[in-house]
Amino acid sequence: MPYVNEEDVKAIAQKNGNPEDVVRRMLYKFAEILNEEEYRELVYFFKYIMAVKPNQSIIEYAKNTIQSVLNVNETMSLRRFFHEPLTVEEARKKLRKGQHIAVNRSVFSHHGIYCGIDYGIKNVIEYDDYIVKESTLEDFSEGDFIYVVNDIPRYSPDEIVRRAVSRKGETSYNVIYNNCENFASWCLTGEPIPWDK
C-alpha cells in the first residue's frame, strides 16, 4: 500500500475544513499514480494553494489534478488518437473545422483546435508559450505527425472554433489545471475550467 504521511492529511484537512478521511483517500489516490517525488511536489503544491487561496476547496483541486494526471498518462500512448498520423500536407486535405488535434513530442503531447481552411493561414488555435494564439499547421506540428483526438464534441464545428477564438490572448496557463489539452477539450465539450466553478 502506498505511503501517506498523516501529518499531511491533518495539515490539509484542518487548513481547508475538509474531513480527514476524504483528504486521506485523496492522498492515497495520488500516491498510487505518482512516484514519490511527484507525490511530495503535489502535496507541497496543495499546501501552497491553501496559503494563497484559503477559501478554495482543495478537494476540487484534487479532482481536477487526478483527472489531469490520468489524462497525461493516457496521452503518453497513441491509443487516444484514432486516426492515422498525418503530415502537414495530409492534414490540410483531411482535417475538418473544429477538430481537436495533437502532436506527440518526446515526453508529452501538444493539443490545439483546427479552425478550417477558410479561417486563413494561421488556422490552428493552441495554448503555446503560455498564451492562447493562432498558429499555422507547420508551427503547430514542428515537424511531427498530426493526430485527430478521439473526443466527442458537444458543439458544432463553428461553435468549437468560436469558443477557441474567445480565449485568444489568454495567459492563465497552468501545466496541471489549464494546459493545452484542457483548452482543446473545453472548446469541444464545455467541461468547466477551474475558475468557472
Image (cartoon, rainbow, N blue to C red):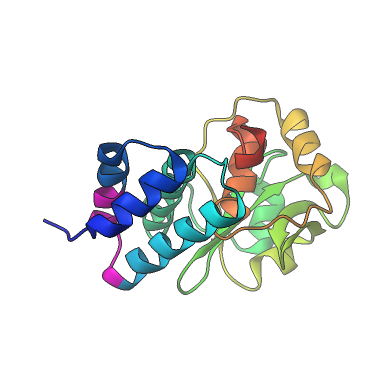
- Image point (56%, 46%), residue name: 54
- Residue 164, position in %: x, y? 75, 42
Farthest residue, direction left: 1
The answer to which image quadrant residue 153 occupies is top right
- Image point (56%, 51%), residue name: 177
- Residue 138, position in %: x, y? 73, 67
Q: What is the magenta segment's predominant secondary structure?
A: helix
Horizontal relation, residue 21 to residue 116: left or right: left
Horizontal relation, residue 5 to residue 40: left or right: left
Horizontal relation, residue 98 to residue 76: left or right: right
Q: Quadrant of the N terminus?
A: bottom left
Note whether 155 is above or below 167 in the view shown.
above
The answer to which image quadrant residue 42 occupies is bottom left
- Does residue 168 belong to the magenta stretch? no
Note whether 27 is above or below 22 in the view shown.
below
Magenta-highlighted residues: 27-36
